[in-house]
């Protein structure tokens, strides 16, 4: 049910992203960030991480990336004197990190979070009743805030953003009237409705599983009504908000092609049911005579770096098969270790094919530096694994 609901959310979210582009909201956001206050590049990076993280708490993080790509393009042009790949790469990584991190904050933030919930119920893991929509947010949102700040510090250090004389390089890549559109107020209403409805329907599905079919039908009806509103209902001027050509014009073709490859490879691996074979291979890398913290950290690192090349669902299920008996032998609550694995599946920042967000970011940005993408991403993987392990073991008490 949850997976089908996410499909409806993705369809609606894609249409919302096209409304955002058509009504010049990316230009508006750039103007608010840069046009009045002339923020430094380090503050701009912080704003981008925060914006992406907040959006991804409520909507699929791939949609967040797709929506903010036009903003990144405009912001990159704002730094006219910097012709290198540093600024586009730094700004894109800010949105990428924020989108991936934001998905950790709610139980419906990513498909891997929902897969954990399904696994806990199917195998009757002790204390699984303590995983609820509200309880997840209690510890999930502080985790998102702390990881977002950590990623901001890393990007500023990695790109020396605090030493950039960015304020003298900023110019606006368009005239001021391009930040407005006659139906922009409608667009804001559509965005708010989508975020509120998606969050509410996700909450209802997680809290009322016995009414899953009813909630799923309601989600589908909202998606259909939303499509009718955008394509057929006349607004100011007697025209609908979107036309068919708006759904495919100005899309990041390279990013969508890379995303398609990622999804196809993931589907093939999942269809072949390789998680048992993969679990057997990974078990050789897990030490047994080690402290509980070292054991969980090893699990987190293996999960994160495996996800850079393989489907995160495949890696998640394979790690679940390995760690349940091992966690019990060491004396750790199994649910905590399963949670670390789930969060680590989202904490993949190094490879362009690790997640749909990574694929869209790398393929949809011009002058992207692969070396910086991978180098800083590898450091973020390690820091994220250490932080998630420490945070879950010390601050997440379930049951």
Image (spheres, grey):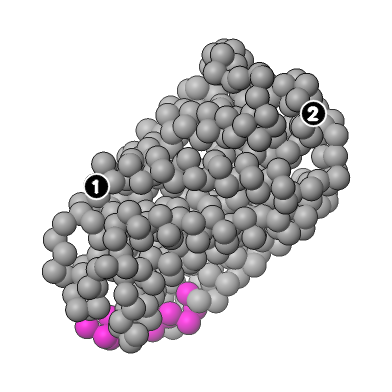
Q: Which of marks 1 and 2 is nearer the N terminus?
A: 2
* Image quadrant occupied by the N terminus: top right
Identify whether 296 is placed above or below 222.
above
- According to the image, label 1 marks what residue? 369
Write the residue at 66% across / 18% down. 288
Write the residue at 49% across / 45% down. 383
The quadrant holding residue 25 is: bottom left
Which element type, helix, strand or loop, lies under badge 1? loop
Looking at the picture, tell me which residue is in the foreground, 193 or 357. 357
- According to the image, label 2 marks what residue? 331
The CA span between labels 1 and 2 is 44 Å
* Image quadrant occupied by the C terminus: top right
Looking at the picture, tell me which residue is in the foreground, 311 or 239. 311
- Does the magenta portion include 214? no
Disc 1 residue crowd, few under 14, some 14–19, many 20+, Cα 10 Å: some
Residue 248, position as x, y percentages in the image: 34, 54
Residue 340, position as x, y percentages in the image: 64, 39
Identify whether 13 is placed above or below 168.
above
The quadrant holding residue 160 is: bottom left
Numbered-mark total: 2
Write the residue at 39% across / 62% down. 68
Left or right relative to 246: residue 221: right
Residue 271, position as x, y percentages in the image: 54, 21
Give the residues in magenta: 174-187
Identify whether 151 is placed above or below 363.
below
Disc 2 residue crowd, few under 14, some 14–19, many 20+, Cα 10 Å: few
Of marks 1 and 2, the one in the foreground: 2
- Does the magenta portion include 178? yes
Q: Please indicate, yes or no, whether residue 135 appears anywhere in the rendered image.
A: yes
């Amino acid at each position: 049910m949850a997976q089908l609901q996410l499909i409806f959310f993705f369809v609606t979210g894609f249409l919302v992203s096209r409304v955002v582009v058509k009504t010049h909201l990316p230009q508006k956001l750039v103007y608010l960030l840069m046009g009045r206050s002339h923020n430094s590049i380090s503050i701009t990076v912080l704003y981008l991480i925060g914006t992406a993280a907040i959006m991804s708490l409520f909507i699929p993080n791939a949609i967040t990336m797709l929506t903010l790509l036009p903003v990144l393009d405009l912001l990159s042009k704002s730094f006219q004197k910097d012709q290198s790949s540093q600024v586009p790469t730094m700004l894109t990584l800010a949105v990428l990190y924020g989108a991936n991190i934001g998905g950790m904050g709610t139980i419906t933030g990513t498909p891997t979070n929902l897969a954990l919930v399904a696994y806990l119920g199917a195998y009757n893991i002790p204390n699984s009743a303590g995983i609820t929509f509200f309880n997840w947010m209690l510890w999930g949102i502080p985790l998102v805030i702390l990881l977002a700040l950590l990623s901001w510090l890393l990007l500023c250090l990695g790109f020396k953003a605090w030493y950039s004389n960015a304020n003298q390089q900023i110019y606006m890549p368009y005239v001021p009237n391009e930040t407005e559109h006659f139906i922009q107020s409608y667009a804001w209403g559509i965005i708010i409705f989508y975020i509120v409805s998606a969050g509410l329907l996700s909450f209802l599905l997680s809290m009322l599983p016995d009414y899953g079919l009813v909630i799923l039908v309601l989600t589908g009806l909202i998606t259909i009504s939303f499509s009718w509103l955008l394509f057929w209902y006349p607004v100011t001027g007697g025209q609908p908000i979107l036309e068919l050509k708006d759904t495919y014009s100005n899309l990041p073709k390279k990013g969508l092609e890379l995303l398609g490859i990622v999804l196809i490879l993931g589907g093939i691996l999942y269809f072949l049911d390789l998680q048992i074979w993969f679990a057997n291979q990974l078990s050789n890398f897990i030490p047994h005579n080690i402290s509980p913290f070292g054991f969980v950290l090893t699990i987190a690192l293996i999960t994160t770096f495996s996800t850079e090349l393989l489907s995160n669902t495949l890696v998640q299920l394979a790690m679940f098969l390995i760690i349940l008996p091992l966690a019990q032998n060491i004396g750790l609550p199994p649910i905590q270790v399963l949670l670390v694995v789930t969060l680590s599946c989202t904490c993949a920042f190094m490879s362009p094919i690790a997640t749909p967000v990574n694929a869209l970011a790398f393929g949809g940005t011009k002058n992207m530096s692969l070396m910086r993408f991978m180098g800083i991403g590898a450091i973020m993987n390690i820091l994220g694994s250490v932080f998630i392990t420490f945070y879950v073991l010390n601050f997440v008490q379930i049951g």
